[in-house]
C-alpha cells in the first residue's frame, strides 16, 4: 500500500473487477455481510464502485484493492492500488 494512503487514513476496500470495458476505468463489485435488524440473519449486500486504473492492467475477475481519492469524474472517486489475485 502506498504511503499516502496510510498517512491520510483513506478508506481501502477489496473487491472483484466485473467490467474493464472503459478506458482507464474498472467497475469493482464490493460485497459485505450485514446483520438483519429484526431477524438477525446475515445478508449479503453489494456495491459497484468505479475506480481509476491508469495503466489498464486489470481484467475481469481480478481481486483488487482500491483506495478513496479525489474525484476523477462525476462517478469515479476511487483509485486502483494493486491487484491481489489475477483471474484464470
Image (tube, rainbow, N blue to C red):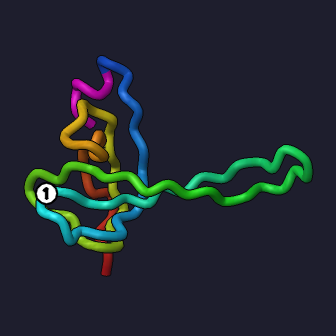
Instruction: Left or right? Give the position of 8 relative to 55.
Output: right
Q: Which residue is mark 1?
A: 24
Q: Is residue 52 above or below residue 71?
A: below
Residue sitting at the far right: 39
In this rendering, the count of numbered labels is 1
Q: Is residue 60 above or below residue 37?
A: below
Q: Which residue is depicted at the point 29% across and 28% down?
A: 5
- At horizontal 13% and vertical 57% (from top left) the residue drawn is 24
Q: Is residue 18 magenta?
A: no
Which percent across, then down, holds residue 59? 23, 71
Location of residue 8 in the rendering, given as x and y in whole percent from the top left corner: 32, 18
Q: Is residue 55 above or below residue 77?
A: below
Q: Quadrant of residue 29?
A: bottom left
Q: Is residue 65 left or right of residue 82?
A: right
The quarter of the image holding the N terminus is top left
- Residue at 35 percent across and 73 percent down: it is 61
Relative placement, left or right, of 48 versus 56 is right
> 33 or 88: which is nearer to us?
33
Instruction: Locate the C terminus by quadrant.
Output: bottom left
Residue 22 picture quarter = bottom left
Judged from this view, the residue extending furthest toward the front is 74
Quick one: 59 or 69, which is closer to the camera?
A: 69
Tell me the magenta residue range. 1-6
Could you tell me what secondary structure mostly forms the magenta stretch? helix
The image position of residue 81, as x and y in percent, is: 25, 45
> Dot 1, crowdedness within 10 Å: few (<14), some or many (≥20)?
some
33 up-or-down from 85: above or below: above
- Secondary structure beneath label 1: loop
Amino acid at each position: 500500500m502506498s504511503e499516502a494512503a496510510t498517512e491520510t487514513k483513506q478508506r481501502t476496500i477489496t473487491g472483484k473487477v466485473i467490467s474493464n470495458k472503459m478506458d482507464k476505468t474498472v467497475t469493482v463489485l464490493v460485497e459485505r455481510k450485514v446483520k438483519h435488524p429484526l431477524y438477525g440473519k446475515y445478508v449479503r449486500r453489494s456495491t459497484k464502485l468505479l475506480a481509476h486504473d491508469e495503466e489498464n492492467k486489470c481484467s475481469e475477475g481480478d481481486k483488487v484493492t482500491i483506495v478513496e481519492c479525489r474525484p476523477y469524474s462525476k462517478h469515479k472517486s476511487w483509485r486502483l492500488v494493486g491487484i491481489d489475485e489475477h483471474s484464470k
